[in-house]
Image (cartoon, rainbow, N blue to C red):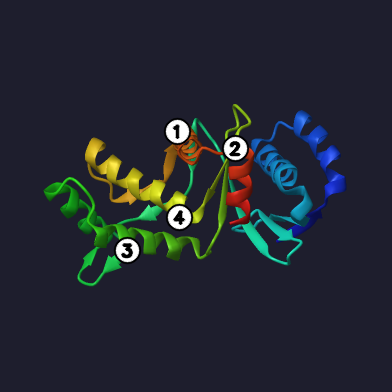
Amino acid sequence: MRAYVIKESHIKKLKKEYDISEDKEKKGIIASIISIYESLLSQIVFIKVYEGNDIDLKIKFKNNHYRYVKIVSSSRDKFDIIDLDLVERKISRTDLFTMIYDDLNSDKKLSPATRNEILKYIDFKRNRKRLLWLFYNDKSGKLYPMNENAVKDLIVNDIESLFLKKGVYRSYSGSIPVEKIDGYWQSYIYKRKRSELQIWKDIVTG
């Protein structure tokens, strides 16, 4: 695992690198670093970039707090977030797939117990708490910051929607359309009636 530190003095160089790079994963990381610095410059000591790790960035704040960041770049107009084998996940004498299927076959919605089991499975697969997610649209260059709870809610709602609309899935690929993430973000901004910059700050430091 390789890691290197980015400080404020590197931002100008990074902006030039972003303009010439054709690597969408690299552009997503650079765009994330620039956006974090520009929204929280006075609060950041440095950002550490990791290669070959389950997280991409670690932000160190001046109050000695840290925040870990996962960056997901879009591919074919979708964000690939997580893979879940629903049959493999055993719960007592049943499995997660059967719980989901039974709920939606009878009530057309997931029960609180099944939702909770999906959330626990996501936690088990991710093995990180309070992770900040940054979704990078490789076509528009737009970034969408989300906290762990928002991402988990999106996954649960997407699983429910897929089963109801398209049938039975023994595994979940976790590919969420860019338009769904964009719609969530626009709704999030509208409901809070605050500037996008202020919401960025709240999510990154929250």
Q: Which residue is mark 2?
A: 196
Residue shown at 36%/48% (left/top)? 172
Mark 1 and mark 3 lie on one chain; the one further toward the N terminus is 3
Q: How many marks?
A: 4
Q: Earlier in the sequence, mark 4 or mark 2?
A: 4
Spatial separation of the CA atoms under disc 3 and disc 4:
21 Å
As drawn, which residue projects farthest toward the left?
Answer: 106
- Whichever of labels 1 and 4 marks the residue nearer the N terminus, that label is 4
| Residue farthest to the front, as pictured | 193
Q: Earlier in the sequence, mark 3 or mark 4?
A: 3
Cα distance, mark 4 to mark 2?
19 Å
N-terminal label among 2 and 3: 3
Nearer the observer, 17 or 2: 17
- The residue that disc 4 covers is 149
What's the distance in space between the residues labelled 1 and 3, CA to CA? 31 Å
At a point 73% along the width and 60% down the height, the residue shown is 61
Asked whether the beta carbons under mark 4 and mark 2 sit within 8 Å of each other, the answer is no
Tag 3: amino acid: Arg
